Image (spheres, grey):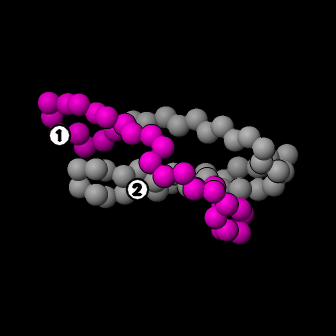
Amino acid sequence: VIKSKDGTELQRLNDFQQLKIISHERNQEVFASFTYTFTDIPAGEYVVDTVLRDKGNGKTATFSLPFVIR
């Protein structure tokens, strides 16, 4: 989700990536690296929210990253 600095949602892209982890043991943690590429965004201050969803138990975790386009 890309939002303006005041929190207005500008764009949302659902389920754009799926991480598949296969393990013999139940995982307690996972490492993921994200690269965001934005095009045609006017200069300004924004926030990108990333939601991670566990398909096994339905729980979610969200993190937000502010960024500036000059």
Q: Residue at x 64, y 64 (%)?
A: 9
Vertically, is 26 above or below 45? Answer: above
Where does the image place residue 25, in percent across and percent down from the top left? 15, 34
- Amino acid beneath label 1: Arg
For label 1, the residue is: 26
Q: Secondary structure at mark 1?
A: loop
Vertically, is 51 above or below 31? Answer: below
Q: Residue furthest left?
A: 24
Magenta segment boundaries in residue numbering:
1-30
Q: Horizontally, is 33 left or right of 47 in the view?
A: left
Where does the image place residue 13, in percent across and percent down from the top left? 54, 51
- Between the C-alphas of marks 1 and 2, the distance is 18 Å
Is residue 40 a member of the stretch shown in magenta? no
Q: Residue at x 31, y 50 (%)?
A: 54
For label 2, the residue is: 61
- Few, some or many residues within 10 Å of mark 1 (<14, 14–19, 20+): few
Q: Nearer the viewer, residue 13 or 28?
A: 13
Check contact, mark 1 vs mark 2: CB within 8 A: no
Disc nearer the start of the sequence (1/2):
1
Q: Main secondary structure of the magenta part?
A: loop
Where does the image place residue 20, in percent across and percent down from the top left? 31, 34
Q: Residue at x 49, y 34 (%)?
A: 33
